Amino acid sequence: MRQGSCFPAFLEPRKTAEKALTAVIQEAWIQGVSTRKVDDLVQALGMTGISKSQVSALCQEIDTRVLSFLERPLDGDWPYLWLDATYIKVRQDGWIVSIAAIIATAAEPAFTALSPAKAA
């Protein structure tokens, strides 16, 4: 009788490599690297290249997560508020533009900082 799995063991490392390549493409997209340069990057990593639609599909999850973060409700009392601002480059309507980003940190009345887990 056969022991173990019928799934070839050599396929699992490819899954890890695929996740790493996806992470590289997503990071390049976040940093504002053009699609053409992402294609050059993928080719430099030994792959055949990647299309604009493939980059968009890989990065759609990022857009969904950012949108849910931006649209989350801010309920409750926040008597302590710290503000800061900086300029960052973002992708907007297919262009890389510089915008001002305001960073707000709030604390509850018990003066406990709002943790990322609590914000979600």
Image (tube, rainbow, N blue to C red):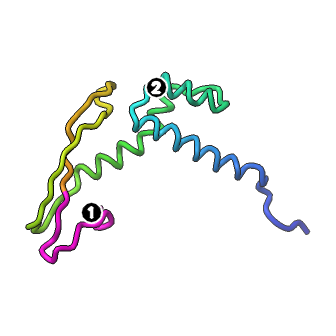
Q: How many marks?
A: 2
Q: Residue at x 32, y 27 (%)?
A: 96
Q: Nearer the viewer, residue 86 or 102?
A: 86
Magenta stretch, residue numbers: 105-120
Q: Which mark is residue 8?
A: none
- On the image, the x and y values in percent for residue 33 come to 43, 29
Per the image, the residue denoted by label 1 is: 119
- Which image quarter is the C terminus in? bottom left
Per the image, the residue denoted by label 2 is: 35
Residue 73 position by quadrant: bottom left
- On the image, the x and y values in percent for residue 19 come to 58, 47
- On the image, the x and y values in percent for residue 41 come to 56, 29
**Residue at the limit of the structure toward the bottom, as seen here:** 110
Numbered disc 2: secondary structure: helix
Q: Residue at x 20, y 38 (%)?
A: 100
Left or right: residue 28 versus residue 7 is left
- Which image quarter is the N terminus in? bottom right
Left or right: residue 79 versus residue 24 is left
Q: Tag 2: Cα neighbours inside 10 Å, few (<14), some, or many (≥20)?
A: some
**Residue at the limit of the structure toward the right, as seen here:** 1
